[in-house]
Image (cartoon, grey):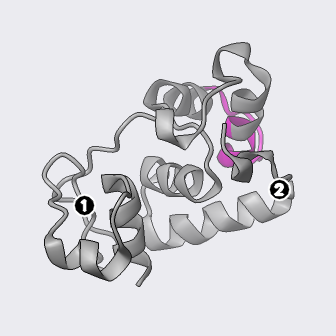
Amino acid sequence: MSFVSLIKKCKDCIVELYEDFITKNTDIKIAMYHTCRYLDIYFEHNLVESVIQNIKNKTPIIRMYVQKVNSLPQYKLYDFSNSDNLEISNKTSSNNEKFVDLLTYEVTPQIIRTWGGGYKKEEYVFLEELY
């Protein structure tokens, strides 16, 4: 568990962040993945599917997902570094933004010079997407 995961996050702020990702990506799983990555929350495909199938009222999906991750004992020691990979090759958002397949993404020497060494592949992708 990282230091970031110990910081309390406002429920409304988490929902707002998720909604920002949803407007950029339009795909629920992609938005969930990016929200979890940003907040250092564990991401699991099966849990996302379970939450989507069991949502009955107007409660935001991300709120239910975070509630499950925080309350179920099997996820207690997990953070984003323990997450499932997101396999989204050849998908594009409504903004024509290309999404990166982590299995084929190559960290080039130029990327390492730009951001420094020692990061995980997912972190380089995140940095490249941000800037």
Q: Front-most of 54 and 22?
A: 22
Task: Identify the disc placed on residue 63.
Answer: none
Q: Look at the numbered disc 2 and give the secondary structure of its residue.
A: loop
Q: Is residue 39 above or below residue 131?
A: above
Q: Look at the numbered disc 1 and give the secondary structure of its residue.
A: loop
Q: Classify residue 25 as left or right of residue 98.
A: right
Residue at coordinates 80% horizontally, 46% vertically from top-left? 6
Q: Is residue 33 above or below residue 79?
A: below
Instruction: Residue 109: name its quadrant.
Output: bottom left
Instruction: From the top left corner, tell me how far across and down residue 20 is, in percent.
Output: 60, 71
Residue at coordinates 44% horizontally, 63% vertically from top-left? 26
Instruction: From the top left corner, tell me how far across and down residue 110 is, in percent.
Output: 18, 79
Residue 94 shows in this picture: no
User: How many callouts does the rendering have?
Assistant: 2
Q: Classify residue 88 as left or right of residue 127.
A: left
Give, as a single range, the part of the protein colored magenta: 54-65
Outermost residue toward the top? 74
Q: Is residue 90 magenta?
A: no
Q: Amino acid at mark 2?
A: Lys
User: Looking at the rendering, in which quadrant would you find the C terminus?
Assistant: bottom left
Q: Is residue 57 magenta?
A: yes
Return the residue at label 2: 9
